[in-house]
């Protein structure tokens, strides 16, 4: 069965968030190692913050808001508690300026020739717009957490996205570098494509180095995914 | 004040829906005049159908659904009541294949270099995706009625779109060929750009031939809008 729409995860799958955040915070910190530690600490609070929403303990809040709250929590660990409101807002917007992996710009163009392409990320709309414009990427639409009102991997997030595209889940394919994202999508009936990004978490990465489920496609990068989808169609 | 985001109406403003629908229905009807009459009758039910939702008499239903219901109502007037479910679905999808006005493809590219560009239409997401792909257009995001849960010209539709972009209304500009759309947007604090499309309703068009409000910009077409926004920025 052909995939009529490709739903893309963004952090890690399309963009190198770790190097990009570390690079931007570097001027405020003593050295590069500290910049990476700052980045990892900030990112470590990402899942717990979304879990507050997923569990129903707090109403939906966009990722820009969660990023800002998490920033407030880590600043003292790095001697940056003196930063004011405007500076904190600027640093939060570092997440809008993430470098795409080298294959992504061209790969997405090839994929958009073959199927509807959609940002399906936990990024809120403004954040996704920032990433798209910073990376000079092109998609047909932004769906994901804020539009569906549910953070991945909640089933409602995937199912509502398919409904908005007016497609049965079986004609949609989730594309991600994360096995848990694909497992949730597969549970909702979507097709799945795994693209490993072994440097997402830096040289010491231990998870998502290889496919851990029966995914529809495993591809090296977005170009390879375009190639494999073309082969399947013929 | 610069417009950081441009919100585009689509039917009429960017696409020539009347000629496009008439062209597609033509093979099922005796002559071209009947094809235009079919198109005009179908379109005449558009506002009343949305008004059922806006008034709260029925819950939100996407425009594809309203188009289909309206189609069912007019088919007998044209001796087409024998058409089955699949054919009716196909005809409803004629609205996904509308020709952009000649200036639009290039004009939108120039505008996207200057500001965030967003589909802000009463089209549902799947319909907007269809229009974007059929017309080979590029935007940063699709917002509009289905994502906001409100049909224009309800204020919630404009205000929720600005909120999703994380921009104050004053930094957003509604672009439309319709004075009533701009009036509602202006009432919400948005900037406004009027682009007349004097042939939207065919040669006998009587409304929206000229600006009827104090709009921020009046432009001949999307190219001219790009030019005027550039002038304002310098």
Image: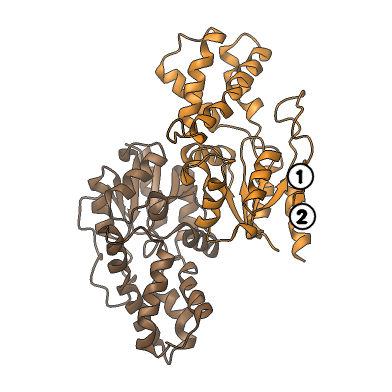
Chain colours: A brown, B orange
Task: Report whether A162 appears left or right of A86.
Answer: left
Instruction: Check disc 1 and report the residue beneath it.
Output: B213
Image mark for residue B31: none
Image coordinates of residue A182 in percent, x first then y, are: 27, 53
Task: Report whether B119 appears left or right of B2.
Answer: left
Q: Nearer the N terminus, badge 1 or badge 2?
A: 1
Q: On what subunit does the disc labeled 1 rest?
A: B
Image coordinates of residue A222 in percent, x first then y, are: 40, 56
Image mark for residue B227: 2
Image coordinates of residue B151 in percent, x first then y, are: 53, 39
Q: B159 or B8: which is nearer to us?
A: B159
Image coordinates of residue A190 in percent, x first then y, are: 29, 44
Q: Secondary structure at mark 1?
A: loop
Q: Secondary structure at mark 2?
A: helix
Q: A175 or B161: which is nearer to us?
A: B161
Question: Is residue A175 in sight in this rendering?
Answer: yes
Q: On what subunit does the disc labeled 2 rest?
A: B
Residue placed farthest to the bottom in the image?
A: A30
Q: A37 or B66: which is nearer to us?
A: B66
């Amino acid at each position: 069965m052909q995939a009529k729409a490709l739903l893309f995860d963004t952090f890690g799958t399309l963009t190198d968030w770790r190097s990009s955040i570390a690079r931007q915070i570097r001027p405020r910190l003593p050295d590069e190692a500290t910049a990476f530690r700052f980045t990892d600490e900030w990112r470590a609070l990402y899942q717990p913050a979304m879990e507050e929403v997923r569990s129903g303990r707090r109403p939906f809040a966009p990722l820009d808001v969660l990023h800002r709250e998490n920033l407030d929590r880590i600043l003292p660990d790095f001697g940056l508690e003196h930063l004011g409101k405007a500076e904190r807002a600027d640093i939060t917007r570092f997440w809008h300026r993430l470098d795409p992996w080298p294959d992504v710009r061209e790969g997405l163009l090839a994929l958009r020739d073959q199927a509807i392409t959609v940002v399906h990320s936990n990024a809120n709309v403004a954040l996704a717009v920032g990433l798209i414009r910073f990376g000079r990427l092109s998609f047909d639409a932004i769906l994901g957490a804020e539009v569906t009102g549910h953070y991945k991997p909640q089933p409602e997030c995937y199912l509502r996205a398919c409904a908005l595209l007016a497609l049965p889940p079986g004609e949609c394919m989730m594309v991600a570098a994360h096995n848990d994202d694909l497992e949730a999508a597969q549970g909702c009936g979507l097709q799945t494509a795994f693209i490993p990004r072994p440097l997402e978490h830096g040289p010491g990465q231990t998870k998502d180095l290889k496919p851990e489920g029966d995914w529809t496609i495993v591809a090296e990068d977005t170009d390879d995914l375009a190639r494999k989808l073309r082969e399947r169609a013929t």
